[in-house]
Amino acid sequence: MSHTVRSIDITRREFVVDVDPAYGAFHVAISKAWTDANRSYRDDHQLAGDNNALPDDAISFWPRDSEIVISYETEKPSAMSVDDVARLLAVHDHLGGRAAVPYAHMAPADQQHYHAAARNVLDHLRLPLAAKPS
């Protein structure tokens, strides 16, 4: 095996507190943003209750000139793109003897046929479409 390809979607959630240049950020605003970030992190990671300790690197504070950003990130496998599903359908047909050539060697019109079928499959499954890389 030469290599493995993985796609991961990362979502960054930010809770922003404005900073007054003359007075800084007020503790009430920071406390509210921290509480919202903490609750959101626990919901996203399905952590029950407020008593369980979070990992040390779970939530980050990013001080800037005009704001303080409290943030965390979540990862999940990427949704399959139309192109991924089209290639998968073509491989299935090729291995089953229904397609004479692999997807990469097909005429553009045949590839479009598989793209249309892939859209139908994804619509039927109601999976979110991943953005096609440019």
Image: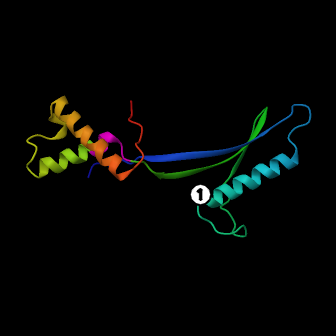
Between residue 39 and residue 51, name the one nearer to us: 39
In the rendered image, is residue 129 in sight? yes
Q: Badge 1 is on which residue?
A: 44
* Residue at left offset 15%, top offset 34%: 106
* Position of residue 45 in the picture relative to residue 97 (left or right): right
State yes or no: residue 84 in magenta.
yes
* Residue at left offset 22%, top offset 47%: 89
10 Å crowding of disc 1: few (<14), some (14-19), many (20+): few
Q: Position of residue 134 (x, y in %)?
A: 39, 29
Q: Tell me the kind of residue under disc 1.
A: Asp
State yes or no: residue 1 in magenta.
no
* Position of residue 82 in the picture relative to residue 105 (left or right): right
Q: Position of residue 123 (x, y in %)?
A: 35, 46
Quarter-of-image position of residue 18: top right
State the SS at label 1: helix
Give the extent of the magenta segment.
80-85
Q: Which secondary structure class fits the magenta region best? A: helix
Quarter-of-image position of residue 44: bottom right
